[in-house]
Image (cartoon, grey):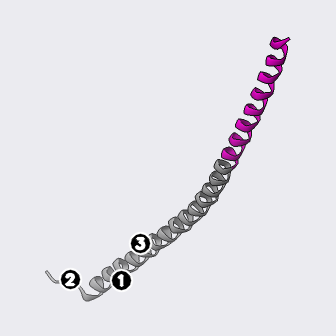
Amino acid sequence: MTIPVEFIALFLSVALTLSGWVIKYMLSAVASMNAALKVMTEHLATMNGRMGKMETWQVMHERNDDERYDQIEKTTDALWNRVHSR
């Protein structure tokens, strides 16, 4: 049994065309995933910057709150000492 050359040529043409489409689809899928990962990376970088600013803000406000508390405590102690000394 001999397979006609035309059938082999047709089969190879279809196989190569399908392979090309599959490869093109896979490359476009990889490109879209890379684009999505780039967007996610940029968003995470923005969030990390905001977290750093928040941590700095928190430390500064904790320090201010501690200083205010110490001042209020000293003032209250001074007032109580004056009241008790009379």
**SS state under label 1:** helix
Q: Nearer the viewer, mark 3 or mark 2?
A: 3
Determine the residue positioned at 44% across, 70% down: 26
Q: Amino acid at mark 3?
A: Val
Q: Is residue 78 magenta?
A: yes
Cα distance between the residues tagged 1 and 3: 14 Å
Number of residues whose C-alpha sits closer than 10 Å to that of mark 3, classed few (under 14), some (14–19) or many (20 or more):
few
Cα distance between the residues tagged 3 and 2: 27 Å
Q: Is residue 70 above or below residue 45?
A: above
The residue nearer to you, when weighing 57 against 82, is 82
Quarter of the picture containing the N terminus is bottom left
Seen from this angle, which residue lies furthest left? 1
Q: Amino acid at mark 1?
A: Ser
Point out the stretch of residues depicted in magenta: 57-86
Determine the residue positioned at 73% across, 38% down: 67
Q: Amino acid at mark 2?
A: Ile
**SS state under label 2:** loop
Q: Is residue 41 above or below residue 58?
A: below
Q: Which mark is residue 13?
A: 1
Dot 3 corresponds to which residue? 22
Q: Is residue 40 magenta?
A: no
